[in-house]
Image (cartoon, rainbow, N blue to C red):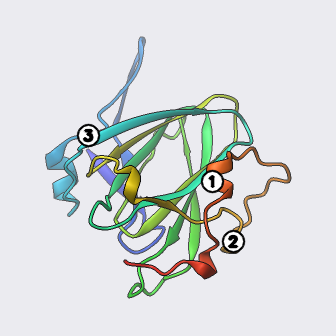
Amino acid sequence: MLTIQGEPLPGALLLAPRIFLDHRGDFVKTMHEGLYGGLGIDFKPAEEFLSTSRQGVIRGMHFQLPPHDHAKLVYCVSGRVRDVLLDLRRNSPTYGQSTAVELSAANRHILYIPQGIAHGFLSLEPDSVMIYKTTTVHQPSHDAGIRYDSFGFDWETVTPIINERDLAHPPFAAFDSPF
């Protein structure tokens, strides 16, 4: 079972999977084509990534440009993050708007992110581990991003830890969206 908990941006869905608990711990089904299809999500994973981030790390805001753009499923298996979305779809009623949800090992929520939405997160705990499933294979020539502090989102951190690549992304105002 998979239930929709909210729609942070049009087409982006916050999902709660069924959690099986017993004396050994818990068990969660994170991917099942039929469950996603039943919610209207056509998701065929092509690649999967895992990242571990120290507390205070910001990763983002990332996406792939067409024709290698992709949808993502992301979830946190250890720790806790503030997961941030920025709508880059020109015809969307929320174009240029951002929002955030909390993903954690405790809540086990899964976030479905359609093409045309930039994604990033702030690690709120030491060693937060994120899993990303994508519908296309990463193409370095089509890898893109928006600078984390250029679209009006309050990350609620004074001294984030960010790599040089993410700091070099263009600001939102300078981005000509192909979506």
Helix, strand or loop under label 1: helix
Check disc 3 and report the residue beneath it. Answer: 31
Dot 2 or dot 1, earlier in sequence: 2
- Please state the total of marks drawn on the protein image: 3
| Residue drawn at (33%, 53%) of the image | 3
Q: Which residue is drawn at 26% across and 51% down?
A: 136
Q: Which amino acid does label 3 sit on?
A: Met
Q: In this view, does 12 lie above or below 91?
A: above
Instruction: Please state the horizontal and vertical placement of residue 75, each as a whole percent of the image.
Output: 45, 42
From the top left corner, tell me how far across and down residue 9 is, in percent: 46, 72
Give the Cα distance between marks 2 and 1.
12 Å
Spatial distance from mark 2 to mark 3, Cα to Cα? Answer: 34 Å
Q: Is mark 3 on a helix, strand or loop?
A: loop
Residue 74 lies, in percent from the top left, at 42, 46
Does residue 37 appear left or right of residue 96 in this picture?
Answer: left
Marks 2 and 3 in Cβ contact (< 8 Å): no
Q: Residue 54 carries which label?
A: none
Decide if residue 64 is in sight here: yes
Question: Which residue bears the numbered disc 2?
Answer: 150
SS at badge 2: loop
Tag nearer the camera, 2 or 1: 1
Q: Distance between the residues labelled 1 and 3?
A: 29 Å
Q: Residue at x 45, y 45 (%)?
A: 109
Q: How crowded is mark 1: few (under 14 residues within 10 Å), some or many (20 or more)?
A: some
- Mark 3 or mark 2, which is nearer the start of the sequence? 3
Residue position marked by numbered label 1 in the rendering = 166
Disc 1 or 3, which lies upstream in sequence?
3
Residue at point 34%, 64% (across, down): 114
Type of amino acid at the residue the image marks with label 1: Asp
Q: Which of 132 and 27 is in front in this view?
A: 132
